[in-house]
Image: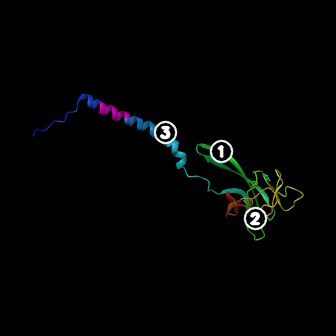
Amino acid sequence: MSEKKQQVTRRQFLNYTLTGLGGFMAAGMLAPMVRMAIDPVLQESGAGDMANVGLAVEDITNEPQRVDWTITQVDGWYESEVTKSAWVFVNENDEIQAFSPICTHLGCVVSWEGSEEYPDQFFCPCHNGRYYKDGTNVPGTPPTAPLSVYEHSVENGMLYLGQPIPRGEA
Ligand code: FES
């Protein structure tokens, strides 16, 4: 049996070389595009982060006070400054409470004692929605759920707030 010599023709050599070179160049061009497309997905989300809202714990009283703070929100490639708010006070059990001011009816902003008619309640001016001091919606008013509660922590005497957690329908 004679050994068959494997010969690569000039045409085959050129084909292999050009195909390899083309593939290498295509991979070089596509890699940054793929990375750019999926990079935001790979980034760690800051959603669970707690923010220092600039309020010392010693300044929190049993009277709800409105606190505003700004966070940097990253949405894919878009970065923006977002202002957040909370109503903060200490309840009768000496626990810090931080409520979202967003009305659970249709999303207007509620105020503590926003109506002279209803002292000691949160009031939503859009449709006269009301909430008791503990954030529970007053039956018979438009909201069907209590105000959401911010997760909170205390570090070095300062209040940190995270995300508002809905409390479900009541
Ligand atoms: S949005 Fe608050 S009562 Fe309707």
Can you give x and y, in whole percent of width and height, for residue 159 in the image?
Answer: 70, 61
Secondary structure beneath label 1 = strand
Measure the C-alpha gap from mark 3 to mark 1. Answer: 24 Å
- The color scheme shown is rainbow
Label 2 CA crowd tier, 10 Å (few <14, some 14–19, many 20+): few
Can you give x and y, in whole percent of width and height, for residue 68 in the image?
Answer: 74, 53
Whether residue 20 is in magenta: the answer is yes
What residue lies at 16% left-to-right and 36% top-to-bottom? Answer: 5
Query: Quick check: 57 above or below 71?
Result: below
What residue lies at 19% left-to-right and 36% top-to-bottom? Answer: 6
**63 displayed left or right of 79:** right
Residue flagged by tag 2: what amino acid is it?
Answer: Glu
124 or 80, nearer to the observer: 124
Q: Which residue is mark 2?
A: 58
Question: Residue 26 has which mark?
Answer: none
Question: Residue 33 has which mark?
Answer: 3
Question: Residue 80 has which mark?
Answer: 1
Query: Which residue reaches farthest top?
Result: 11
Locate the N terminus and report the quarter of the image it occupies.
top left
Whether residue 115 is in magenta: the answer is no
Measure the C-alpha gap from mark 2 to mark 1. Answer: 31 Å
